[in-house]
Image: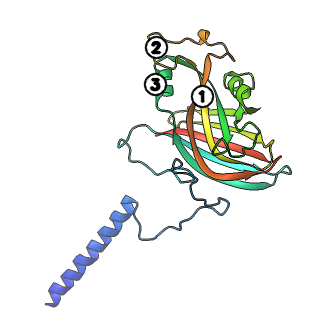
């Protein structure tokens, strides 16, 4: 009986060691990790049901289990005129385009222009950080996106586009810039990236060439690319809203 009990204990010890090794190999541990966002990021509830992904970290997806998804990782800092930080916000969003922009560009039916980043109030009746309610950061006030943004609303130049296309990746595009609030009592509750494209709004039989799309003419239209509603960020007159959005594909 003692020999049987000793053998059982040995087998239990071996099983325990094998189980521990399996947990290490698969990345599982018996220790829980601390949860919670950094202290500098305020936890806020979503502003609307349309903002399902707002202010939530991107969840990892199993490779090959889903189609290609476009992600937008946003970082917004609101700074006072003296440079001190008033608000720091980090959140995610996804593609809002119905696929027309990507398909038309890949198919050669449209020609790409440049980007604009919008910082707006949640609804037309809400107070934005600019009088028109359409507050856009553009690369140039006379470029394709700037032409439309500045003629229809308020715009400020200085948007910088940085593309990482060096193999093996990860590949990404970063849009960064800033907008100084020109209206008191405003807030940012809706963000959006838009791309100026030239071409028919429906798929045509022939392709569109760059020569058919002069810079800054009405042939270019703005197409929403990524965007979401967020919990409103209050911005006082004269405060600077610094934005960085990293667009990735997975």
Q: Is residue 225 visible?
A: yes
Q: How far is the residue under mark 2 from the one under mark 1?
A: 20 Å
Q: How far is the residue under mark 3 from the one under mark 2?
A: 12 Å
Q: Earlier in the sequence, mark 3 or mark 1?
A: 3
Residue positioned 66% across, 41% down in the render: 124
Q: Position of residue 221 (x, y in %)?
A: 61, 23
Residue that carries the numbered disc 3 in the rendered image: 103
Q: Earlier in the sequence, mark 2 or mark 1?
A: 1
Residue positioned 86% across, 51% down in the render: 82
Instruction: Pick out the residue farthest to the front.
Output: 125
Q: Are marks 2 and 1 in contact (CB under 8 Å)?
A: no
Residue that carries the numbered disc 2 in the rendered image: 204
Q: Is residue 170 visible?
A: no
**Label 3 neighbour load within 10 Å: few <14, some 14-19, many 20+:** few
* Mark number, residue 195: 1
Residue 137 image-quadrant placement = top right
Q: Earlier in the sequence, mark 3 or mark 2?
A: 3
SS of the residue under disc 3: helix
* Mark number, residue 214: none
Q: How far is the residue under mark 3 from the one under mark 1?
A: 14 Å
Q: Position of residue 229 (x, y in %)?
A: 59, 47
């Amino acid at each position: 009986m003692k020999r049987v009990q000793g053998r059982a204990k040995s087998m239990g010890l071996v099983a325990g060691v094998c189980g521990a090794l399996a947990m290490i190999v698969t990345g599982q541990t018996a220790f829980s990790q601390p949860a919670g966002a950094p202290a500098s990021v305020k936890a806020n509830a979503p502003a609307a049901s349309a903002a399902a992904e707002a202010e939530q970290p991107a969840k990892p997806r199993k490779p090959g289990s889903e189609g290609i998804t476009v992600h937008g990782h946003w970082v917004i800092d609101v700074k006072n005129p003296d440079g001190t930080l008033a608000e720091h916000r980090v959140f995610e969003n996804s593609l809002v385009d119905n696929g027309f922009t990507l398909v038309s560009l890949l198919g050669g039916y449209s020609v790409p222009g440049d980007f604009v980043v919008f910082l707006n109030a949640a609804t037309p009746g809400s107070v934005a950080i600019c009088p028109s309610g359409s507050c856009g950061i553009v690369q140039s006030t006379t470029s394709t996106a700037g032409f439309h943004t500045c003629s229809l609303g308020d715009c400020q130049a200085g948007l910088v586009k940085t593309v990482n296309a060096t193999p093996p990746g990860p590949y990404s595009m970063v849009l960064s810039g800033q907008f100084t609030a020109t209206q008191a009592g405003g807030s940012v509750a809706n963000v959006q990236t838009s791309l100026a494209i030239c071409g028919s709004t429906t798929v045509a039989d022939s392709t569109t060439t760059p020569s058919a799309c002069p810079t800054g003419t009405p042939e270019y239209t703005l197409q929403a690319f990524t965007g979401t509603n967020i919990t409103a960020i209050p911005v006082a007159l004269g405060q600077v809203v610094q934005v960085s959005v990293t667009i990735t594909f997975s």
